[in-house]
Amino acid sequence: MKTIVWFRQDLRLSDNPALAHAAERGTVIPVYILDVGGRPLGGASRWWLHKSLAALKSDLPQLTLLRGDPLELLNRLSDQTNADAVCWNRCYEPHAIARDKAIKAALRERGLDVQSFNGSLLAEPWQVKTGQGGPFKVYSPFWRAAKARAIAAPLAVPKLDVEAAAGIGDDLDDWNFVPSSSNWAEGWEDIWRPGESGAQARLERFLDNGLAGYGTLRDRPDKANVSRLSPHLHWGEISPRQIWSRAQFLADREPTYRKDIDKFLSEIGWREFSYHLLYHFPSLPEENWRPAFDAYPWRDDSDDLEAWQKGQTGYPMVDAGMRELWQTGYMHNRVRMVTASFLVKHLRLHWSHGEAWFWDTLLDADQANNAASWQWVAGCGADAAPYFRIFNPMTQGEKFDPDGAYVRRWCPELSGLDNKVIHAPFKATEEVLRAAGVVLGSTYPRPIVDHAAARAAALAGYEAVKAANT
């Protein structure tokens, strides 16, 4: 028997339920289909996908690359190869759910055996329920319920009998996923290693060197105590079950790591919660989860948005984060919260502007995480931060980048400033600025908004929401 395995966001051979199922049936025909429907990939995601597919094709040379309508291509592929079955691991974006339901029904109508599996979450979004049987809307009780469920051990790489689809398929380079004329991704290959082996190496490096003290040091962007597994997780180069299993094994062997491991796994929990929300509330990427926030008086200022995007706001912690994002395709999570809060609360620009920018520039751009996190910061999402919590970018910098190392790395024009003023250069005297070679408005921008005034305006906006809904 022959089974087409449709790879999607599961670009690995180990702990791949669809691949394991197909291997048990007989001959495996692997294919990756670039779906032309749905939301177009951002630039950073295209770069990563190119590298990840190249790595998978190195491990699985028979992988066929196709581009177009998945149903049409799967029909053609099954006819050509005489496959009697198709299987895949599920995706949970609203577009993907609707697409996959239609494809499953159409293929079954043609007499094909069609199966789908959970290859990207610890639990299906519909499996974790409140006592009343509904979806959770708050993270903590969700994660307690999710952890209480049995989590299966990850699957080994199956023994494969693989057949290539002869005479069809694209060359990966023809998809033009990597920049050529203007290489904005220059140097990324020195930072990232997309692919299954890169994901496993990244996990082991974190457990060996970054785990100790993770519970507190994860908030320090100047430290290396974060896993940076998020792009590997998004593309399924490693599964949550593999991370869970490896971390729990380490915790059992080294009990002193238990608190840090529990905190690390709680970040996997936030990813699970985001998918839970997206599944039950599919309008999450486009609409306020709390409709009351439709009344918020957002501003519309393209100059302020561009200054934020380019890391030219005059607030070093914000600018450092936005420059790290542009130059590496990644931003430290603490700084993500600071930069996002600045956009929606200091500049009062709609969270969708930030969501769109992160979608294009983040290597780990993920519809569930991106939408849920932006709405959380804006105060209009599930389990959202209180509306009156407005991150002060200066005190955030002083607390989490106390030596200014993070700012100095990404805003080198400020490197000569003393730690006392590096997070608020506009408060420094002219003498101090001159000695550091800083000219506000020239070598580094003046603040595009006053913190105190912006905070007051944001709070007034939230009061307007309350007034409109009473």
Image (cartoon, grey):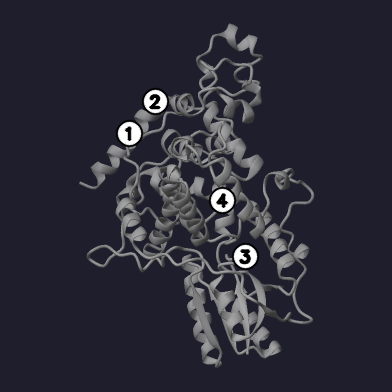
- Residue 86 lies left or right of residue 190; in this view the side is left
Exactly how many numbered labels are in the figure? Answer: 4
Viewer-nearest of discs 1 and 3: 3
Viewer-proximal residue among 345 and 423: 423
> What residue did someone put label 1 on?
459
The kind of residue tagged 3 is Leu
Q: Which image quadrant is residue 148 in? A: bottom left
Q: Are marks 2 and 3 in contact (CB under 8 Å)?
A: no
Binning the other alpha carbons within 10 Å of mark 1 as few (below 14), some (14 to 19) or many (20 upward) gives some
Q: Nearer the viewer, mark 2 or mark 4?
A: 4
Q: Indicate the position of residue 154 as horizontal and vertical percent values.
A: 51, 66
Foreground mark, 2 or 3, reads 3
Q: Amino acid at mark 1?
A: Leu
First in sequence: mark 1 or mark 2?
2
Query: What secondary structure is found at the residue carrying circle 2?
Result: helix
Question: Mark 3 highlights which residue?
Answer: 11
Q: For residue 159, which numbered disc appears in the image?
A: none
Q: Earlier in the sequence, mark 1 or mark 3?
A: 3
Cα separation, mark 3 vs mark 4, equals 14 Å
Q: Badge 2 is on which residue?
A: 453
Residues marked 2 and 4 touching at CB (< 8 Å)? no
- Eye-nearest disc, 1 or 4: 4
From this view, report whether residue 206 is shown above or below residue 16. Answer: above
Check disc 4 and give the amino acid type.
Leu
Q: Which mark is residue 229?
A: 4
Residue 369 higher or lower than 31, as above or below: above
User: Which comes sooner in the sequence, label 2 or label 4?
Assistant: 4
Query: Reading the chain from its start, which is encountered first: label 1 or label 4?
Result: 4
Residue 171 image offset from top left, x and y in percent: 77, 68
Using the numbered discs, state the Cα–Cα distance from disc 1 to disc 4 in whole angstroms.
Answer: 36 Å
The image quadrant that residue 215 belongs to is top left
Work out whether residue 456 can be spotted: yes
